[in-house]
Image: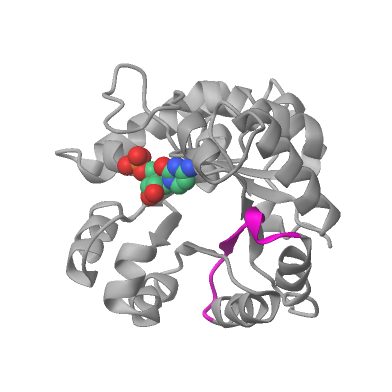
Amino acid sequence: MPIPERLNPTFASAQSPALLHSGALEEARRRLIVALDAPSADAATRIVDSLTGVCQWFKVGMELFTAEGPAVLEPMLKRGYQIFLDLKFHDIPNTVAAAVRSAAALGVGMLNVHAAGGPAMLAAARAALDGLADPPELLAVTMLTSMDAGQMNAIGLERSAAEQVILLARMSLAAGIRGFVCSSLEVAALRELTGPEGVLVVPGIRPAGAESLDQRRIATPAEALRQGASYLVVGRPITQALDPAEAADAILQEMAEAL
Ligand code: C5P
């Protein structure tokens, strides 16, 4: 499947050193996804409004989508924003394929499934997008970052988290999925595995000097980009800042310098 233009960022290694600074800033803007972890449409709208002209992508997850339904996406899409619908589908292949089709029909730019759903589920999810004129990028979630060794043992997984991530990533690639949500600890290994075609979306980003909050595997924006991230997902460092636009601008600046 050819990579749609909007999902085909140029990776750091391929950047011309002569890239104009404003060009780097625009490139950074195309690669920043703001996590809209809000309980209601009103709260989400306040965040979106505070970032007018600053950001292009918002991530809508289970909390907001469950509270407000697909209608919550419409005003954002009408204003030209791109949406990453972070619902992490995981069910039998037929059900996941149907959910992927429903999500694609909403007009989102990215959506995700759990790689642990297995090869048949991944292939069905991937096939559900066949034939669409402008399909969303399908991302696989390998291991949740909340799964430490104890949690993995409890569900019968004996590999290390790093080995499990690679196993699930290989399986996803074999099913035709080249996009992944991954932590900054895994991004370099996944970039090696996928090559430049991979679309690697990395949460757990904290600007230098910021509090980690509850995130364990964190990286600065510059570190994550240098290790091969295509997109960075940033939530609270922007959405809970006194001035979200100023916080986002500082992150974009740091990203631009790393590009
Ligand atoms: O506020 P913060 O920047 O930590 O938000 C990160 C976002 O990325 C949240 O929406 C969180 O659910 C999501 N996420 C994550 N770690 C993962 C997968 C998703 O933090 N492994």
Q: Position of residue 15 (x, y in %)?
A: 71, 28
Q: Position of residue 165 (x, y in %)?
A: 66, 38
Q: Position of residue 43 (x, y in %)?
A: 18, 63
**237, 253: nearer the viewer:** 237
The magenta-colored residue range is 106-118
**59, 95: nearer the viewer:** 95
Image quarter of the N terminus? bottom right
**Apparent side of residue 156 relative to residue 64 in the rendered image (left or right):** right
Image point (63%, 83%), residue name: 98
Q: Is residue 171 magenta?
A: no
Q: Quadrant of ligand 1?
A: top left
> Compared with residue 27, is residue 188 higher up or lower down, i.e. above or below?
above
**Rendering colour mode:** one colour
> Compared with residue 174, is residue 64 higher up or lower down, i.e. above or below?
below
Q: Is residue 234 visible?
A: no
Image quarter of the C terminus? top right
**Apparent side of residue 178 relative to residue 150 in the rendered image (left or right):** right
Q: Quadrant of residue 113?
A: bottom right
> Compared with residue 253, is residue 33 higher up or lower down, i.e. above or below?
below
Q: Quadrant of residue 64?
A: bottom left
Image point (46%, 55%), residue name: 57
**Apparent side of residue 192 relative to residue 147 in the rendered image (left or right):** right
Q: Is residue 76 visible?
A: yes
Image point (23%, 71%), residue name: 41
